[in-house]
Image: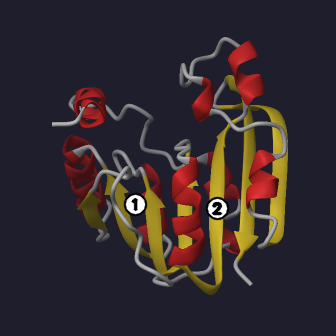
Amino acid sequence: MKLDQKRWDERFKGKEFAFGREPNPFLKKHIRLLPKGKTLDIAAGEGRNAVFLARQGFDVDAMDISEKGLKKAQKFAKEMGVKIHTLSVDLDTYKIDREKYDLIANFYFLKRSLIPQIKKGLKKGGRVIFETYTLEHRTLGTGGPKHARYFLKPNELLRIFKDFHILYYREGIFKEGGRRKAVASLIAEKR
């Protein structure tokens, strides 16, 4: 078992949801900008975003390295009366199918080598919704990853998707769920 899998299985093993059952606030607020259809939720964890998307009529593939997280996601989906397809994968080696998805969601998982696959995995006219921490977050002392490679540099997310049509972008310090965080958030369409 990989160290990442062991760490996330440990985080998700309890009955409580590590990040709660509510979807990411940025996703919830901007759901109307997202095309319904075949959807990929990258690093889906316990499925809060995947289940939300399924409840809105999206056909969701939820992928994560943690089998414990994905089992909770399946149970949660069943409780909510929806179906999601879970994929237990290691994103260090997994290849996203080419032009398969209408929407790819990526929340708080930054693996720069995966970006070209996200782009290729979207159909023409498909959209990506992406949100994660910026370097500025480390100065807030409110948690998050330890290593600098897991943080975006200023305007990095905007530059990464410069070949896409940017529908929405924000970057800064925001208060959500009673906690301050420094993030970059983007919705962009493949041309």
Q: Relative to the observer, which residue lies in front, 19 or 91?
A: 91
Residue most toward the left? 1
Residue drawn at the location 55% of the way across and 42% of the way down: 108
Q: Of the two numbered discs 1 and 2 on the same chain, state the one appearing first in sequence.
A: 1
Circle 2: element type: strand
Position of residue 38 measured from the top left corner of the image (x, y, whole percent): 45, 81
Local crowd size for mark 2, using a 10 Å CA cut-off: few (<14), some (14–19), many (≥20): many
The Cα atoms of the two marked residues, 1 and 2, are separated by 16 Å
Left or right side of 109 for 16: left
Q: Is residue 79 left or right of residue 127?
A: left
Q: Quadrant of residue 176?
A: top right
Image quadrant where one finds the N terminus: top left
Residue contact at pointers 1 and 2, CB within 8 angstroms: no
- The amino acid type found where label 2 is placed reads Ile
Q: Secondary structure at mark 1?
A: helix
Q: Which mark is residue 51?
A: 1
| Residue at the spot 45% in from the left edge and 57% down from the top edge | 42
Above or below, 8 relative to 77? above
Residue drawn 49% across the image and 45% down it? 22
Q: Measured from the top left, where is residue 78 in percent x and y?
A: 24, 62
x, y percentage for residue 105? 54, 61
Image spot of residue 191 (x, y percent): 74, 84
In the figure, 136 relative to 73: above or below? Answer: above
Mark carried by residue 43: none
Residue type, label 1: Val
| Foreground disc of the pair 1, 2 | 2
In the image, taking residue 53 as reference, residue 139 lies left or right, namely: right
**Residue nearest the viewer, comparing 41 with 93:** 93
Q: Residue furthest bottom?
A: 124
Label ID, residue 129: 2
